[in-house]
Image (spheres, coloured by chain):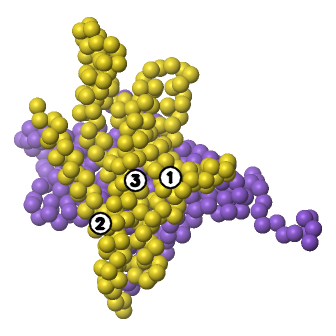
Amino acid sequence: MSETDSIEFFTSFRVEDLWFLLEAAGRTLLISVLGISGGTVLGIAFGWLLSIGRWYGAATLGWVLDVFRSVPLIIQLVLFFNFFPIVGFPLDPFGAGTLVLVMYTSALVAQVARGGIEAVSISTRRAARSLGMSYWQDLRYVVWPIGIRAVLPSWTGVALGVLKDTALVSVLGYMELLRASQILITRTQEPFLVLAVVGAFYFALSFPIARFSERLERRWSHD
Amino acid sequence: MDYTFHWRPVIRKLPDLLEAALVTLEVAVLSMVIGILIGLALALIRMSGKRSTVWFAVGWIEIARNTPALLQLFFFGFGLGAFGFHLSPYMIVLCGLSFNNAGYLAENFRGGFNAIPDTQYRAARSLGMSAIQAYARIIIPQVFRIVYYPMTNQMVWAVLMSSLGMLVGFRELTGETQFLASKTFRIFEYFLFTAAIYYGLVKIILGASRLIAWRLFRY
C-alpha cells in the first residue's frame, strides 16, 4: 500500500478545534460556577456555625471539614463517584463532580468565612446590639460588610483554586477543558501546541478575576 | 444496598500503601526545597525591577498561579516530549510540583520582603555589612519568619498535589492505590484507606511544622 491511499489517523490542528475547546471551556466554567456558588453559600453557613463556637460544632463539623481539606480532591472524586452507586444513587460524572466540588469548596470557604466573622471585634458587635439591633441585623449590617472586606482576597484565592481544580473532574470522564485537550492531543499528535492553547484558555478565565479582586482590594483599602 | 465491602485485600496491601506514602512525602519535600530556592530567586528578580529579567519572573509566577497544576504536569510530560525530552514519571511530578511551588512561594516571599522596612537594610549596611551579608543575616531570617506559615500551607498543598502523579503514571500513594485497586476492583475500599493515609500525612506535617516553629521562633 502506498503512502497516499493509507487511512489518516492523525490530522493537524485546525481552526475548528478552537470551537471544540471553547465549548469545553464553557463546561469548565459551568461546573466551576456551580461548585463555587454552591460551596460558598454552604461554606458561609458552616463558617457561621463554627464561629458560634459550641464544642460539638467544632468536634463534628470542624473535623469533617478538616478531612475534606486534608484529602486530595482526586481521591475525593474517585471515592464519591464509586460511593454513590453503592448506596443506590448512581450519578453521572457531572453530577458527582459538582457534588464533590461543592463539598470541597464549602470546606475551604468555611475557614475563610469563620475568619471574616472573627475579624469583627466583639466590642463592635456589642455596640451594634446595644443600639437595639437584633442578632440577625447585627450579622447583616455590621458583621457582613466588615467581614467581607477582610476576607475577600482569601475567598478569591479559594474560588480561583477551585476553578483550576475542576480540571480533575476530567478523571471521572466529564468533558471539560483538560479532557478535551487530551482528545485533541491524541488526534493531532501536537501536545505542545494544544497544551499551550488550553493553558491560555485557563489563563483567560483565571487572570481577569485575580486582577479584578486585586483592584477591588486596593479601592477598599483607601476608604 | 447490595454491595459487600471487602477490606481484607486492602489490609494485606497496607505495607505497599505506606511505602508509597513515603514516595509521596519524598517528592513533596524535594519539590518544596527546589520551589523555595527558585521562588526566592523569582521574588528577588521581580523586585529588582530590571525590565530585561522581570518579564521572566512575572511570566513564571502568573502561569504557575493561573493554570491548573495538572496542566503543568501534562506540559512536563507530553509537552516536553514533543521536543524529544522524555522525562520519567518521577521527574515529571518533581518538575511540575517544583514549577508550581516556585510560582506560589515567590508571591509569598515578595509579600514577606515588602513587610520588612527599608530601614532594616540601610541599618545593616551602615553597620558595615555587605549587601549579601545584609540579606543573608538581617532580611532573609525575618522574611522566613513571616512566610513560615504560608510555606507550611504550601507543603500541605505539595503533598495533596502529588496525587496528580497517578495521571502521569507515577506510582506514589494515589498511583499505587489506583494500581492495586485495578487488580481487585475494590476501588472504594482502597481509596478510603488512602484518604485516611493522606489525612495522617497532613496531620504529621502540620504537627512537625508546629514543633519546628516552637524550636525556631522561641525568642
Q: CA distance from mark 3 to mark 2?
A: 16 Å
* Label placed on residue B197: 2
> In which chain is the residue bearing label 2?
B
Which residue is rendered at x = 62% and y = 58% of the image? Answer: A181
Q: Colour of chain A?
A: purple
Residue density around tag 3, few if under 14, some if 14–19, many if 20 or more, within 10 Å: many
Q: First in sequence, mark 2 or 1: give its number.
A: 1
Q: x%, y% of residue A157?
A: 38, 45
Element type at marker 2? helix
Which amino acid type is shown beneath numbered disc 1? Met
Amino acid on which the number 3 mark rests in the picture = Val
Q: Label 1 is found on which chain of the structure?
A: B
Give percent across and percent down for residue A219: 37, 29
Q: Label 1 belongs to which residue?
A: B91
A147 vs B25, nearest the viewer:
B25
Q: Residue furthest left?
A: A130
Mark 3 against mark 2, which lies toward the viewer?
3
Residue hosting label 3: B27
Q: Position of residue B68 (x, y in %)?
A: 49, 51
| Residue shown at 43% from the left, 77% from the top | B181
Which comes before the other along the chain, label 3 or label 2?
A: 3
Using the rendered view, name the quadrant where residue B36 is placed. top left
Chain B's colour is: yellow
- Secondary structure, mark 3, is helix
